[in-house]
Amino acid sequence: AAKKTAGNKAILYDEQISIEKNEQLRIEARLKKAIADEEINVYYQPKIDARTNQMTGVEALLRWTDGELGFVPPDKFIKVAEDTGLIHSLWKIAMKKACYQVSKWNEGREKPLSLAVNFSAKQFQDPCSLISQVKEILAECQLAPELFEVEITESTLLFNTTETIKALEDLQQYGIAISIDDFGTGYSSLSYLKKLPINCLKIDRSFISDIREDFSNSEISEAVINLARSLRLKVIAEGVEEEYQKEFLLQHGCHFMQGYLYSKPVCAKELESLLR
Ligand code: C2E
Ligand code: MG
Ligand code: MG
Ligand code: MG
C-alpha cells in the first residue's frame, strides 16, 4: 500500500508540473501577443516624504489584463518573462513609457519627481547594451539621470556578481541611484553591502505589515534603518498601510514611505489628479 501511495504521489506531482508548464506556455504566448499589440500598461505608485506629505517620486509597475486570461498579477507574468527572455521587451516598455511620462509631469513642477524602475537579474547578463539603452532612453526623454532610480533585489547581486557590480557602478557614476528592493528577504551579508554601489535600502513589506504584532519584525525594521544610517544610505519603507506603521517609522528615522496609506499604484491619469 505504501508503494502505491508513493506512486500516486509521483503521478500527482507530474500532473502538477505539467499543469504549471501549460499555464506558463499559455502566459508566454499571450504575453508575446500583448507586447506586440501594445497592451501592457504602466502604473505609478507615489513615494512620499512623510515629514511633509509631499510626493517625491514614483515607482513604475507593469499592469497587464489579457482578453483571455484576464488580469495577470505582475509577479506571475514577470516570472514567465524572465524564464523566456521576454523580460527585456517588458523592461523597455516600462522604461520608455515611464521616462516619457515623468519627464512630461516634471515640465510644470517646481520640484521634479524621481522615477524608479524595477530591473531583473537576467538583464545584467548583457550589461553593456543595458547601460547604453538606459542612457539612450533617459536622453531621449530628457530625464536627468539624477532623477532616475534602478530597483534591484538582493538576489540580482548574487547572480553574475562581478559583471553586475560593474554595471551598477557605471550607472551610479552616471548619476543614477541604485536601490535594493525587498531588503531583508535575501542574503546580503553586511560586509558585502559596504562594497556595493548602492544608494538606498527599501525595507520589505513583510516586515512592515505586522510591526505591531510581531516584535521581531519591528526589531528588524529598526535594524535596517540603523544599518542604512551607518552606511549613509537612504532608506524607504514599502507596504505602509496603517497610521501606526507610519508613526513607528517616523519615530525611528525612516521618513520615505510607499504604500496604500498614501496611494495604491494608479494609472497615469489618476496620478495626475493626485499631483493637482
Ligand atoms: P515590488 O517592486 O516590490 O513592488 C511593490 C509591490 O507591492 C507592488 O505589487 C505594489 O502594488 C505592492 N504594494 C505597494 N504598496 C502596498 C501596500 O501598502 N500593501 C500591499 N499589500 N501591497 C503594496 P505589484 O505591482 O503587484 O508588483 C509585484 C512585483 O512585480 C514588484 O514588486 C516587482 O518585483 C515586479 N514588477 C512589477 N513591474 C515590474 C517591472 O517593470 N520589471 C520587473 N523586473 N519587475 C516588475
Ligand atoms: Mg520595486
Ligand atoms: Mg519591493
Ligand atoms: Mg516585491
Image: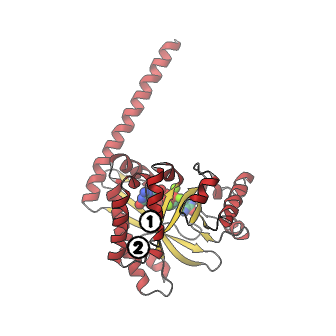
Q: Is residue 164 above or below residue 54?
A: above
Q: Is residue 97 above or below residue 160?
A: below
Q: Is residue 218 above or below residue 49?
A: above
Disc 2: which residue: 268
**Do labels 1 and 2 touch, CB within 8 Å?**
no
Q: Quadrant of residue 44?
A: bottom left
The residue located at (69%, 54%) in the rendering is 217
**Element under label 1?**
helix
Residue nearest the observer in this picture, 83 or 144: 144
Q: Is residue 118 left or right of residue 225?
A: left
In 3D space, how far apart are the residues under numbered discs 1 and 2 (Cα atoms)?
30 Å
Q: Which amino acid type is marked by label 1?
A: Asp
Is residue 201 in view? Answer: yes
Q: Is residue 242 left or right of residue 83?
A: right
Q: Is residue 220 left or right of residue 127?
A: right
Residue 129 locus on image (x, y percent) = 33, 60
Q: Is mark 1 within 8 Å of ligand 1?
A: no
Residue nearest the observer in this picture, 137 or 34: 137
Residue 187 locus on image (x, y percent) = 59, 48
Residue nearest the observer in this picture, 57 or 33: 57
Please give the label number shown on residue 170: 1
Residue 100 locus on image (x, y percent) = 36, 75
Q: Which amino acid type is marked by label 2?
A: Ala
Residue 266 locus on image (x, y percent) = 45, 69
Is residue 60 in view? Answer: no
Q: How many marks?
A: 2
**Element under label 2?**
helix
Please give the label number shown on residue 136: none
